[in-house]
Amino acid sequence: MGSDTAQTVNVPALIGQPLAVDTWTADQPRFPKLRETIDVVDPGLKVHDRKLFNVLLAHSYEFLRTDPNRTFAASATDLKRAIGWSPKKTNTHLNDSLRRLQQTLIVIGYNSNGKLRRRNLSLLITSDVPFSEGTVFWRFHPELAPYLANPTEYAMIYLTVSAKFTSGYALRLYELLAMRVQSGEMSWAVDIDSLRMQLGATEVSYDHIASLHRKVLAPALAEINDYAPFNVKVERQTAAAGRGANKVTGLVFNIMRDPERVIEVTTMTTAPRVQFFFDLHTNQISAEATEESVSDAAASEQADRVLRRRDALDSKYRGWPLNSLAKEWGRDMLTSGKDTKRPFEAFEMWLSYRFGHLFRNGEPQPVSSPDQVTSWITTPELDRAGRSALAMRPAQRRQWVHAARHQDETVDVERMDPIEFHRWVPLIARDLLLRG
């Protein structure tokens, strides 16, 4: 690094959804990975530890710049799937990987008063893993976070590629080559000793090039050429070793992009408003479509089904703008393409979800002005996060309430009903969206 603070540069954003493994084929999720983290050579780290770090960083990447002290959360099942493990694998292995990552140091070089210094930072400073299925928490070192979020030198790492490697040497070599591709350097010449150091292949048995090739390079290159968005061919550099023999002193990696494997994806920067409809029989929510296709007359017709019991509504929701709310509910219901035989109950459920902050002990509070009846769902992000929470089982919601308490320890939620979502969903909306 050129200074004692991380420089803000324009780097590509995260693409795809790191934890939504089912969408990986289409999304091709990838993220910028800081050179210093690629350069880490720690013989104690296993290949799945490195895969896990890539997933943790991809999941956290977009928020490290603005919230370096953030505690991140993800379900243990999602993390295991993202690194190629069976969801049935015990959390003990996740805990072991996180512990090793927590013991890993990153060295940041910087200048201070004209002198080069090295700053040693722990990769993770917190990890929290449940014994069985549940939510995993982690936190990066806050001094490291700005470097991770604004790397001056980096590689775009494809999670689809990272997850497939079985060789730790393959994963390290892939990241080293991806860093060259990112800088436009399609040929990388490196001496054998430096290569061995960067790959962590420093055992005495690899002193002989034939052994190094057979056990390290050949398997790594085979996996890279199978999975990476580029192909690699290797040339040997030699020097005379006497008696007419030549000694291999270095290698040249020639990199060629493979357009058939690279799927460029443009991501939406804004999300359309999502409409909700409660099905009382299945206790589920359905959504989608847009409001434009629903006429005012049709929405009013649905509202009238609710307003037939206007006296009961006026008594319970004193001061609330029931006409406009009923019409909005009717529009949402029609947009979803569903119908209900119990409109009054469906309308009340809709109110409790969207305006849960206006309820006390399960009952709506009177208001002195209709303008006071505003929903906590004010952004597309909250819209989609709420929808994600609605699709969960109560046990899953409990896990995410626990995650919300990591953001605000004062959160007090006992019921997992939608009426309580306003207390915890906004605290972890981004985490809910990143789970896919």
Image (cartoon, rainbow, N blue to C red):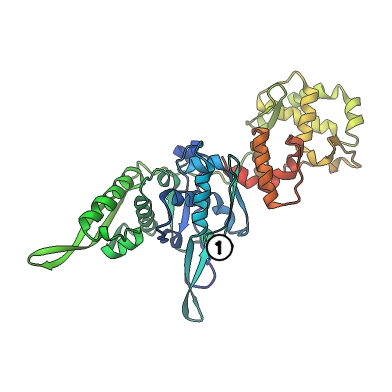
Q: Position of residue 308 (x, y in %)?
A: 86, 21
**Badge 1: residue crowd in 10 Å (few <14, some 14–19, many ≥20):** some
Rendered-image quadrant of the C terminus? top right
- Give x and y (percent) for residue 194: 31, 65
Q: Position of residue 65 (x, y in %)?
A: 58, 59
Relative to 366, does residue 208 appear above or below in the rendering? below
| The image quarter in which residue 183 lies | bottom left
385 up-or-down from 66: above or below: above
Q: Is residue 195 left or right of residue 17?
A: left
Looking at the image, is 89 positioned above or below residue 332?
Answer: below
Q: From this viewpoint, which residue is outermost toward the left?
A: 243
Q: Nearer the viewer, residue 418 or 139?
A: 139
Asked whether residue 278 appears in the rendered view, the answer is: yes
Inspect the image, locate mark 1, and give the three-letter code of the amino acid beneath it: Pro
- Residue 289, image x and y in percent? 63, 31
Q: Residue at x 48, y 49 (%)?
A: 52
Q: Answer above or below: position of 357 versus 294.
A: below
Kindly state the secondary structure of the residue where label 1 is placed: helix
Along the horizontal axis of the image, is 323 left or right of 415?
right
Q: Residue furthest top?
A: 341
Q: Nearer the viewer, residue 293 or 197?
A: 197
The residue wearing badge 1 is 146
Question: Is residue 191 in view?
Answer: no
Answer left or right for 183 relative to 334. left
